[in-house]
Image: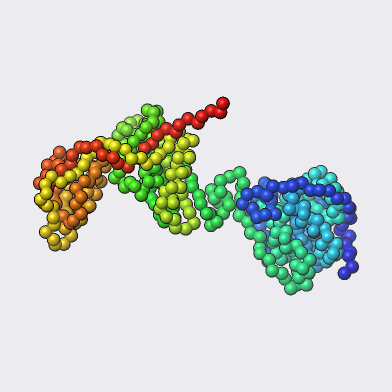
Amino acid sequence: MQHTTCSFYPFKTVRCLSWLWLVLLFLEPGKAIAQGLSTGAGLTIGDAVPELRLTNIHNASNTEANLSDFKGKLLLLDFWATWCSPCITSLYKLDSLQQEFGEALVVLPVTAEPVSKVAPFWQKRGWRLPTLTADTVLHRLFPHRGIPHQVWIRDGRVLAITGGEYATAQNIRAALDGTGFQFKEKREVRLEKDQPLFVNGNGGTGEQLLYQSALSTRLPVDIGGTAHYKDRILAYNVPLPQLYFKAFSEKFHFHDEQNRLLLEVSDTLRQRILWEKSEKLTGNDTIDAPFRNWMDRNQYCYSLVFPSEQPRAVMNALMLEDLNRLFGAYLGVQGSLQRRKVDCLVLVRTTRRDLLASAGGAAQRNVDEQTFELRNKPFRHLLSALQYENMFQPLPLVDETGYTGHIDIRLPQPLNDLDQLRQALQAYGLDLRPARRKMDMLVLSEVPPTPRAK
């Protein structure tokens, strides 16, 4: 093949080493990020390219041209920048390809940088290609973030949008012959590298997410609580202890969150961790303001997300790591599960006679404002009800009856009236007695100060 060039190119020759470019995290090897460019809607494959007047063309006999001037040729737009090492490598290859294919091919590098910066850079490398400088029009027409970014145009339509790896003699020959070539279309999402991933669509919708955790202060919405799913843990507008209890959900139940907590912190930190006044809002903003202010400052939201189902123990362990790391830095607090000897109420049997055994029949649970009744139900249903109804008592309730059978029992409401409850339980050979026992407790303590280097 005779090597000829289009009259569009007055070529020059010089060689020089290019700058190295550190490829940014999350990008494919050999790709860089075009800074300051938007990835809004633009032309895609098959679209007709509008007539445009191109200006600021460097290293050519004419500094201006129309896109229609390249009719009947294969036009390859190559978006590049002086700081992009992969672009420089690609431009050396494109310069050779232009010489090989002559007037049938028009390679037009495009950069947003000014000619004052591009001209000496171009001259040092001796490229014979022209380049469009200070461009804004083509960048808007073909928005992108990663470079090299190449757009193939034939007969006034977009033939392909690719990375620099597809600019080969074989592919160019196939495009010129009209037989086409196999390529993966270069698709991009908006990515601002100085902003958090997947917030406001930064980086896409999150389909590629492998793991993510996030912590925030209270959100302005009147919902709260925690939830544990197969692939995520979520918590909304809850105080610090509730987050830690969720991280130890294999050990604690919902009714443990009030009386299985030990705080070993200063009074100042205690006030940040617990609101020990009334938590009921009155509707009088003057009265409610202190509690609302405390909630805004000391309630939190947390999310831990995986792409697929994970064992509860794995998620809990990661949540605990997050909480201790983040609140260790934010508040100087850490949480741990510790076996401690504490005051509690122990449910015991007072007689060897079995006064609980069910007479059989249909299993029933009848509860109203006056009565709590179980018929032919497992004993654990009674224990669960007592622990739930007494969760706000200062002492945790512990079962030492050893009873496992089905029971019949009828108790007066409310179950959190301890004097009344004890009297009713005694008729069934049961009692609640104060004692000290070793129990698993959630301990929130201050992080030891970091030793200073001598």
| Residue toward you, 31 or 394 | 394
Q: From the viewer's perspective, tell me whether residue 90 is left or right of residue 251.
A: right
Q: Quadrant of residue 331?
A: top left
Visible residue check, residue 228: yes
Residue 294: horizontal and vertical position, in percent? 39, 34
Residue 452: horizontal and vertical position, in percent? 53, 28
Location of residue 333 with respect to 315 vertically, above or below: above
* Residue at figure coordinates x 76%, y 61% from the top left: 76
Location of residue 447 with respect to 131 vertically, above or below: above
Q: How many marks?
A: 0
Q: Quadrant of residue 219?
A: top left
| Quadrant (top left, top right, bottom left, bottom right) of the N terminus | bottom right
Q: From the viewer's perspective, tell me whether residue 421 is left or right of residue 288.
A: left
* Residue at figure coordinates x 33%, y 46% from the top left: 252
Location of residue 73 with respect to 401 vertically, above or below: below
* Residue at figure coordinates x 32%, y 33% from the top left: 276
* Residue at figure coordinates x 79%, y 55% from the top left: 91
Q: State the colouring used for the structure image.
A: rainbow
Visible residue check, residue 414: no
| Quadrant (top left, top right, bottom left, bottom right) of the C terminus | top right
Q: From the viewer's perspective, tell me whether residue 415 is left or right of residue 453.
A: left
| Residue toward you, 62 or 269 | 269
Residue 377: horizontal and vertical position, in percent? 19, 56
Residue 182: horizontal and vertical position, in percent? 69, 69
Q: From the viewer's perspective, tell me whether residue 350 is left or right of residue 157.
A: left
